[in-house]
Image: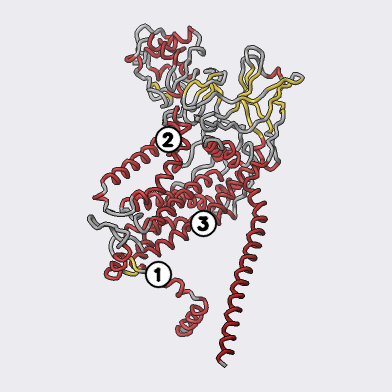
């Protein structure tokens, strides 16, 4: 009898051990499966979050006006479609630039964004200055900094003339880095 | 009948387990004294609830699309029944929440409640502070008027200053190269789903910690916090002196929060939400973006900081602030808690308060911005009394003063902007010659007009200015 009991006890212990081993194994397997499936599912989620970094930034040449509309020495506001001009962006499909017809017959297109913190600068024709409404930034007519906090001159868009039409190349919103 | 309802409740409570869950929270012992100092935390929570409720209500009316968001805001503001009231309450609720977070934080610092064992309470609170500010900012963008659009440009520029990855961060914020179709939907998602989710999680953590470590007792000079004995001491202290949270602390919390809610309603009713600015467009550039009052602080900081260090300070500053905030409980997590015995800490609090409030007041006036709406100066206003200035000099000078943009920044007899020095009596300070030099060379925050004015105009302007005495 005694030995029988012993054997039974031993068997039971062994079974328990095996069970523990199996339970642990199964737990690991199911956790791994969960982790893998969650990771796979996370790919499109993260992609949606960082989508703007994954897209290629394309550029386009946009016509902004005819040469004759811009007498020498003037600086005028022009509008153009952004590179990613989706319909649903509404009014925000278009950006603006200050187009200057320089005295040497060339054209310069300044971004309207102040290099300080991006506020839209306005051209004061009579004072021949670009002035920023936000923190007192001022630029000369050639885009160099005249006063205030801006760290850099006004950014420029590339300009070309095609059959008497002035075209500028779209560019990302100018961001000042250090 | 009464017995029936009682039995019904008992059945429900037994099966649903309501009191088992809530009773420990409601009854948990709190220190008996200084209960009024704890109302700010609960008021913050109340404000958050107000924001969730009014926010959900607004989402019934709002359209998170670049094309239509502005129209839906017009609809909310001018047409929807009680729409403007809702918007106003959401706005003043945000303001109140930001104020309450600030006060709660300062009060926690003054009483050094962040010390052992409540370090994590403080840290989760710092996270909540950051989230709250982020909510305030994104909320302002969601108005999607010209102010909202240009404010997001400003935010992108600030992110751009982060070393190495700045441009990517900016692009991520805007959802592309420029502001466009995706920008608003992202702001919407941040403001309505992502950040609130984090706020819920961290509020849960924060409350759990308050419950776990108990509300800190009022500090007493000479009673030091010692991590080895504190928990035991606190337990004994509660055993001897505590009162249950409900109703002793709770009624104060409820009363205080209700007063804040009433104030919010009053403000919403009497002052209303900030008016919508122009429709959103990157091409209508005649706009002067200015943030809501709680962001004005940064606005002021960016204008006043020395320009040379600003680009660097823009990233270092916030980073350093956050790091310091996170470090506070580790710099000193034991010892004296009483404000009387921590004079330097109190000095620091006062400095921060003075700094913040003066920046706020300055920011609301923003005297550094050129005043493009300045009324043109007239000869009558300029009151020529100078010697040797002929009439034509004065009348031409007055014109030049306005046309050349001087008046956007300089005032003569109350006409003009405040960015530069008042020139009403400049004739007493500077000779014509000195004025010429100054105008030609500019300096500091003034452009050099040397290449802009003709010699004749320059002379006229200078002699006109010298008549201003
Ligand atoms: S954004 Fe132009 S001066 Fe700050």
| Marks 2 & 3, CB-CB < 8 Å contact | no
Q: Secondary structure at mark 1?
A: helix
Q: Which residue is mark 1?
A: B26
Q: Position of residue A138 (x, y in %)?
A: 50, 23
- Residue at the image point whose x is 59% and y is 55% from the top: B60
Q: Which residue is mark 2?
A: B301
Name the residue nearer the viewer: B208 or B8. B208
Outermost residue toward the left? B222
- Residue at the image point whose x is 39% and y is 55% from the top: B119
Sooner in the amino-acid sequence: mark 2 or mark 1: 1
Q: Which mark is residue B52?
A: 3
Q: Quadrant of the C terminus of chain B?
A: top left
Q: Could one spot residue B453 in this view of the protein?
A: yes
Sooner in the amino-acid sequence: mark 2 or mark 3: 3
Q: Secondary structure at mark 2?
A: helix
Name the residue nearer the viewer: B459 or B368. B368
Q: Quadrant of residue B419?
A: top left
Chain at numbered mark 1: B
Q: In the image, is B413 to the left or to the right of A50?
A: left
Q: Nearer the viewer, mark 2 or mark 3?
A: 2
| Marks 1 & 3, CB-CB < 8 Å contact | no
- Residue at the image point whose x is 35% and y is 58% from the top: B38
CA separation in Å, label 2 and label 3: 31 Å
């Amino acid at each position: 009898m005694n030995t029988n009991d012993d054997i039974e006890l031993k068997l039971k212990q062994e079974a328990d051990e095996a069970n523990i081993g199996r339970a642990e194994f199964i737990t690991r397997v199911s956790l791994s499966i969960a982790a893998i499936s969650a990771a796979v599912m996370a790919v499109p989620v993260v992609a949606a979050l960082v989508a703007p970094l994954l897209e290629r930034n394309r550029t386009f040449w946009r016509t902004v006006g005819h040469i004759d509309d811009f007498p020498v020495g003037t600086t005028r506001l022009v509008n153009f479609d952004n590179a990613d001009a989706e319909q649903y962006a509404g009014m925000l499909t278009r950006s603006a630039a200050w187009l200057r017809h320089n005295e040497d017959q060339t054209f310069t297109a300044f971004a309207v964004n102040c290099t300080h913190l991006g506020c839209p600068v306005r051209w004061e024709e009579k004072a021949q200055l670009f002035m920023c409404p936000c923190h007192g930034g001022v630029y000369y007519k050639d885009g160099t900094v005249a006063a205030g906090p801006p760290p850099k001159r006004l950014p420029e868009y590339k300009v070309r003339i095609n059959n008497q039409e002035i075209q500028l190349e779209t560019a990302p919103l100018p961001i000042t880095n250090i | 009948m009464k017995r029936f309802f009682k039995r019904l409740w008992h059945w429900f409570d037994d099966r649903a387990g309501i009191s088992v869950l809530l009773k420990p929270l409601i009854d948990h012992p709190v220190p008996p004294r200084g209960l009024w100092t704890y109302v700010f935390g609960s008021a913050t929570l109340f404000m958050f609830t107000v924001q969730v409720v009014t926010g959900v209500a607004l989402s019934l009316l709002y359209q998170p699309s670049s094309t239509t968001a502005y129209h839906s805001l017009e609809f909310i503001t001018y047409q929807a029944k009680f729409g403007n009231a809702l918007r106003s309450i959401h706005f003043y609720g945000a303001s109140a929440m930001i104020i309450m977070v600030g006060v709660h934080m300062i009060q926690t610092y003054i009483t050094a409640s962040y010390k052992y064992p409540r370090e994590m309470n403080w840290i989760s609170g710092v996270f909540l502070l950051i989230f709250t500010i982020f909510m305030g900012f994104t909320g302002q963008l969601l108005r999607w008027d010209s102010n909202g659009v240009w404010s997001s440009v400003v935010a992108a520029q600030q992110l751009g200053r982060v070393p190495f990855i700045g441009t990517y961060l900016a692009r991520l914020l805007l959802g592309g190269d420029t502001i466009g179709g995706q920008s608003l939907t992202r702001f919407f998602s941040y403001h309505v789903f992502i950040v609130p989710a984090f706020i819920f999680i961290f509020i849960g953590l924060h409350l759990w910690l308050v419950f776990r470590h108990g509300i800190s007792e009022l500090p007493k000079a000479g009673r030091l916090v010692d991590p080895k004995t504190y928990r035991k001491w606190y337990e004994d202290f509660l055993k001897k002196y505590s009162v249950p949270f409900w109703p002793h602390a709770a009624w104060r919390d409820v009363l205080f929060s209700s007063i804040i809610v009433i104030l919010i309603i009053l403000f919403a009713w009497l002052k209303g939400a900030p008016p919508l600015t122009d429709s959103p467009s990157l091409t209508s550039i005649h706009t002067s973006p200015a943030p809501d009052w709680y962001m004005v602080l940064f606005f002021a900081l960016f204008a006043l900081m020395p320009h040379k260090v600003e680009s660097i300070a823009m990233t270092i500053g916030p980073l350093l602030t956050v790091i310091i905030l996170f470090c506070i409980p580790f710099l000193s997590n034991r010892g004296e808690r009483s404000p009387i015995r921590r004079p330097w800490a109190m000095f620091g609090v006062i400095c921060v308060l003075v700094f913040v409030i003066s920046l706020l007041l300055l920011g609301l006036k923003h005297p550094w911005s050129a005043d493009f709406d300045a009324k043109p100066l007239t000869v009558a206003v300029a009151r020529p009394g100078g010697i040797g200035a002929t009439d034509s000099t004065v009348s031409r000078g007055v014109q030049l003063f306005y046309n050349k943009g001087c008046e956007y920044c300089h005032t003569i007899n109350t006409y003009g902007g405040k960015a530069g020095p008042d020139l009403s009596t400049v004739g007493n300070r500077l000779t014509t010659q000195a004025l010429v030099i100054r105008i030609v060379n500019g300096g500091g925050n003034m452009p050099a007009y040397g290449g802009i004015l003709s010699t004749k105009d320059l002379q006229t302007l200078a002699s006109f200015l010298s008549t201003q005495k």
